[in-house]
Structure formats: structure tokens, C-alpha cells
Amino acid sequence: MNDWLEKRLTKLSTFESYKKPEKIVKAIKLDSNENKVLGKSLSTNFAIQSAKNIDLREYPMEHLDLFYDKLQKYCNIDKKYLAVGNGSDQIIDLILSIVGKNQEMTTFVPTFTYVINRCQLYDIKVNAIFLDIKDNSLNKKKFIKTAKNSNIIYICSPNNPTGNQFDEETVKEIIDNLKNKLIILDEAYVEFGKYSMSKNIIDLENVVILRTFSKAFGLAGARIGYLISNEKFANIFKKTIQSPYPVNSISLSIASKMLAKSNCVMKAVEDIKRERERLFKKIVDIKSLKVYESNANFIFIQAGNKYDSILKELKKERMIVKEFGNIGQRKGCLRYTIGTKEMNKKFSIIIENIK
């Protein structure tokens, strides 16, 4: 093998990779923040209709145009500020790839580990500020001071895995103080949150918002994400950075149909938010656990010495949650995706009965 390639592959093999969930047959899968409340039949019917009507011998041109028309209506933002990707993680990857080596990114932890892992791949140093263990709040002054020595800022809002969304004024202050930095606002869970910054950033040269169809819209398998930015960035991204046809025709068609039925999606979102609050109130009374208020479609729990017992009982019932273990000072952490009322009831009974 070429010496250069062998050295590069050897180095890459040492990098930490994003851990994909384990596939378990007939499990109640509540580990990836997918929308299990939105009926499966909706996307299934759209997939069947799309497959019947689409000529897969052709590139997805008209389907992309239709998608942008539907998306701009949903976002209430002109399509010149929008750009599509093969999931928001592909968009993150492309943005990081153009930054260049030996740059620095400031973020906080815990947060979406995929971004940190990809920075390692692109030789981007990560400066991370720990969120407060009590309430996951951010030391704003420390964050801004650290970020002034970086080129890129990553803010997940609402944050994954903690679920909280910083108040809007905090995010605005960060943006105002870092006008010469590239700021990536990841709004993957924004439909479940308190606010979006989308209307505030289209006139800013340095801010990019990321969105996805994998969470609220229940289309994780379709792999569709998009960005919102100023017109110049969106245009260059579409024409130069992104591949010519990043999303297949069927996925685009399904997403367009789902956007036309966004009222059904939003009903499911409201159901999830109600269940989230109900479940939080149940768990917050369990003194041996620390549960954090959430603005996403999941709840983050610090189980401490109950961690192993909880996981053991959940696995007996074939319930799969995201296992984090220890994160900094947080001991025995897990993340539970809000499911149907029946799923949530089952989950709460299990953890309430842990001795």
C-alpha cells in the first residue's frame, strides 16, 4: 500500500466514530429520537404514491423544485435562503470540510457528538465548555471568551442530549459578540422547542441554521436535511459545495407530501410535548434520579447508581434507550425518546419500581 495512504488510514483508525444504535429485533426502539407518535401509515402511503409516479431513470430535478416550493411555505422564508442536504449531518460534514485544517471550533458538552467526531476527521481542534451540571445552563461569558479564539461556533438548540434550549437572548448575545465567526445553529429539534432563530439570521453573513426531517416529520429513513442562511451562503452551498443531486427523487417527493400535511405533523408534535411534560412530572419526584427539563422530543436522566438496574429492567421489556454512562461529572446518564402514551407509561412504571 502507498506509504502516505497507509499512514493516513492508520491515523483514521484511531479516531472515535459516531456510535450508531444497535438493531434489536422486535424491540421498542426509543434511543434515536425518532417520531414514533406520528402514524407510520402516513409516510408509508406517501412512499407508495411516490414510487408509483416517479421515473427513477431520471435525476431528481422537478422533485427538488417542488420540495423547495413546499419548504419555503412551511418555513415562511424565501427559498433563496434555503439549501437541501442528505440529512443535516451531511450538511454539517460539508461545512466542516470547507473550513480547512488547523482551525478551531468552540462548542459545549454534552452535545451532539457527531460534530466533534467529524472535527477530528478534518483536523479541527475543539474547545468545549461544560454545561452546568445542575440545570445544563451555559456560562455565557466564558463561552464567548473561548469562542473569540476559534473560527467556528457550534450551538445545538435545543441541545442533544440534554434537551434544554438556552433562552433566546443568550443566543442573540453570542451571535452579536462573534460577528466574524462562522456560527452553526443546529435546530434539529426546533419544532419541539421554544423558538427558532431563522427569522433573525437571513441578513447575517456568518450564521447557518441546520434543520432535519428526521425528528418532527418522522422521516429519519428518507435522509433529508436543509440549511437556512443568508442568500450568498445558500447559493454557494447549492452551486459549489453540495453535490448536484444530494437527495433522491422518492425522498424529496415524500418530504413534499409531508410538508403539505404539516398540520398532522404538528398535531403529533403537540402530543409529544404533552407527554414529555407528563413524564417529566412523574420522574422528577423520584429522589434517586436527576431528570432535566426538556425542549426536545426526549428527556435526559442522570440515574447515578441506579443506571445499571434501570437498563437491565428496560432490556427485559425489550425497551431500548440511549446509553451514555458517565459524561464528565454526570453519572449514569441515559436518554429516553418520548413515545406513545403506552410506551411512556411502561417506561415510567419500570423506573418507578427500581429499588
Image (cartoon, rainbow, N blue to C red):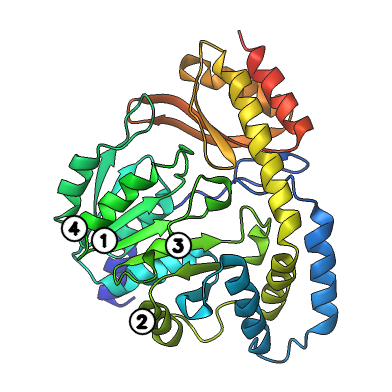
Q: How far apart are marks 2 and 1 (CA)?
A: 18 Å
Percent of width and height locating residue 32: 59, 46
Q: Do the residues labelled 1 and 4 touch (CB within 8 Å)?
A: yes
The three-letter amino acid code for the residue at tag 3 is: Ser
Q: How far apart are marks 2 and 3 (CA)?
A: 16 Å
Residue 15 seen in this snapshot: no
Q: Name the residue under label 3.
A: 198
Which residue is at the front of the view, 52 or 38?
Answer: 38
The three-letter amino acid code for the residue at tag 2 is: Lys
Percent of width and height locating residue 82: 49, 75
Q: How crowded is mark 4: few (under 14 residues within 10 Å), some or many (20 or more)?
A: many
The three-letter amino acid code for the residue at tag 4 is: Ser
Q: Residues within 10 Å of mark 2 (few under 14, many from 20)?
A: few
Which numbered disc, 4 or 2, marks the residue closer to the eye?
Answer: 2
Q: Mark 2 points at which residue?
A: 232
Residue 58 seen in this snapshot: yes
Residue 13 horizontal side relative to residue 60, left or right: left
The relative height of residue 55 versus residue 343 in the rendered view (above or below) is below
Query: Residue placed at 22% from the left, 44% from the top?
Result: 143
Q: Mark 4 points at which residue?
A: 150
Is label 3 in a helix, a strand or a loop?
A: helix
Which numbered disc, 2 or 1, marks the residue closer to the eye?
Answer: 2
